[in-house]
Image: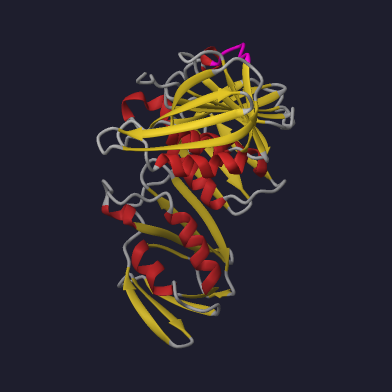
């Protein structure tokens, strides 16, 4: 059978689908794309056995329906450098050979029978469903993902938590040293629920979703979920377990507050970070008389650096230790011209928020302190 498709459209959909695939698969068939040609389109499925990415490309023409598996890496490399053009693909079901014909040449690759390819399980009929604007979903993921843990022992902390209330949705991420809470009350789901989206699923969504007002549908039960966007469907298992009470660790009263220019802080942190101890990343932050002093030193190499920044601070002098790298990550993620750092005492977590932020889309980032060697 023969079908013709836009080369660039096919490659972009293959590239998106490949993001769920793993470099190490338990089944060799999972190194392939499942291609299903029918009803004037080719449907592409990629999987790592736990996540399934399904997307479709409209065909220019087709002769018959068929379904087969083809090695993902070989197919993508074969068409990656092609200029936009109609790409004719001919599949021989007797030999499982796929031949591609384009303006300057052709290629041939042997595929596999589609029968061994695992198929995703459907979501339960009584599953919960909500629709959320793509921008709201992406903002929540972008702000929280960097704070999630990499330690598989604390599996629930390796993902972003969706805390859904009737009048708002809160995205949260923490690894025990830093925490992000993004509460959005512009979006009002009308239901109460919660689930944890794994780091890998969040990374896929960051790569394939485009900010905008188009609605993204999320259907989930206690174990599985399905995300449906105009261009794709993503099936996956949810992270099992109870997410920690993230609100409990956020200090209620922070009397010491300093407002500083965000870009100036980023530049200073990058310079001081070079001289901080490479294992701990410890940096001293001292606030006094509208001045923020950042100090980093590495006694092992007898190096040190100091940066002075103007800030709005008129309270008692205070010093606290933070990880320079973590504070830099927070400053890079947060938006706005200025940031406000809120402190209680050197032994309690610091809070970083935009100096001006939308009350209907509040972002709070918490950073645990480090002990100063003084």
Residue 260 falls in image quadrant: top right
Front residue of 261 and 333: 261
Residue 163, percent from left and from top: 58, 23
Q: What x and y, as percent, mark residue 24?
A: 27, 49
Residue found at x 56% / y 63% = 57
Residue 204 vs 102, above or below: the answer is above
Magenta stretch containing residue 251, yes or no? yes
Which secondary structure class fits the magenta region best?
Answer: loop
Q: In which image quadrant can residue 166 be found?
A: top right
Q: Quadrant of the C terminus?
A: top left
43 magenta-colored: no
The residue under the point 34% across, 49% down is: 22
| Residue 142 in view in this figure | no
Coloring applied to the structure: secondary structure
Q: Quadrant of residue 342?
A: top right
- Residue 346 in the image: state x and y as whole percent: 48, 15
Q: Nearer the viewer, residue 147 or 286?
A: 286
The x and y percentages for residue 369 are: 44, 21
Residue range in magenta is: 250-255
In depth, the one of 63 and 108 nearer the eye is: 108
């Amino acid at each position: 059978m023969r079908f013709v498709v836009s080369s660039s459209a096919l490659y972009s959909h293959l590239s998106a689908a490949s993001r769920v695939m793993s470099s190490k698969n338990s089944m060799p068939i999972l190194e392939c794309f499942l291609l299903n040609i029918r009803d004037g389109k080719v449907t592409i499925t990629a999987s790592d056995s736990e996540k399934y990415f399904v997307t479709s490309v409209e065909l220019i023409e087709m002769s018959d329906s068929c379904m087969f598996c083809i090695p993902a890496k070989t197919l993508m490399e074969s068409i990656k450098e092609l200029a936009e053009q109609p790409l004719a693909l001919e599949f021989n079901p007797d030999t499982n050979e796929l031949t591609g014909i384009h303006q300057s040449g052709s290629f041939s690759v042997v595929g596999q029978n589609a029968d061994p390819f695992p198929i995703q399980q459907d979501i339960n009929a009584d599953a919960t469903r909500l629709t959320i604007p793509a921008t709201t979903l992406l903002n929540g993921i972008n702000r929280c993902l960097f704070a999630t843990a990499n330690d598989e022992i604390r599996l629930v902390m390796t993902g972003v938590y969706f805390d859904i209330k009737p009048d708002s949705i809160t995205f949260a991420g923490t690894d025990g040293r830093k925490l992000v809470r993004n509460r959005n009350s512009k979006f009002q789901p009308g239901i109460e629920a919660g689930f944890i989206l794994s780091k890998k699923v969040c990374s896929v969504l960051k790569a394939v979703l485009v900010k905008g007002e188009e609605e993204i549908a999320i259907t989930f039960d206690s174990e599985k979920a399905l995300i449906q966007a105009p261009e794709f469907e993503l099936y996956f298992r949810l992270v099992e377990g109870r997410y920690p009470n993230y609100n409990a660790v956020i200090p209620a009263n922070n009397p010491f507050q300093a407002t500083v220019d965000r870009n100036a802080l980023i530049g200073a942190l990058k310079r001081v970070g070079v001289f901080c101890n490479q294992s701990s990343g410890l940096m001293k932050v001292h606030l006094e008389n509208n001045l923020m002093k950042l100090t980093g030193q590495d006694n092992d190499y007898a190096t040190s650096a100091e940066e002075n920044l103007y800030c709005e601070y008129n309270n008692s002098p205070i010093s606290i230790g933070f990880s320079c790298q973590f504070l830099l990550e927070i400053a890079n993620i947060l938006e706005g011209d200025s940031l406000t750092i809120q402190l209680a005492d050197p032994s309690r977590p610091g809070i970083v928020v935009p100096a001006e932020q939308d009350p209907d889309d509040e972002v709070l980032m918490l950073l645990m302190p480090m002990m100063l060697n003084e």
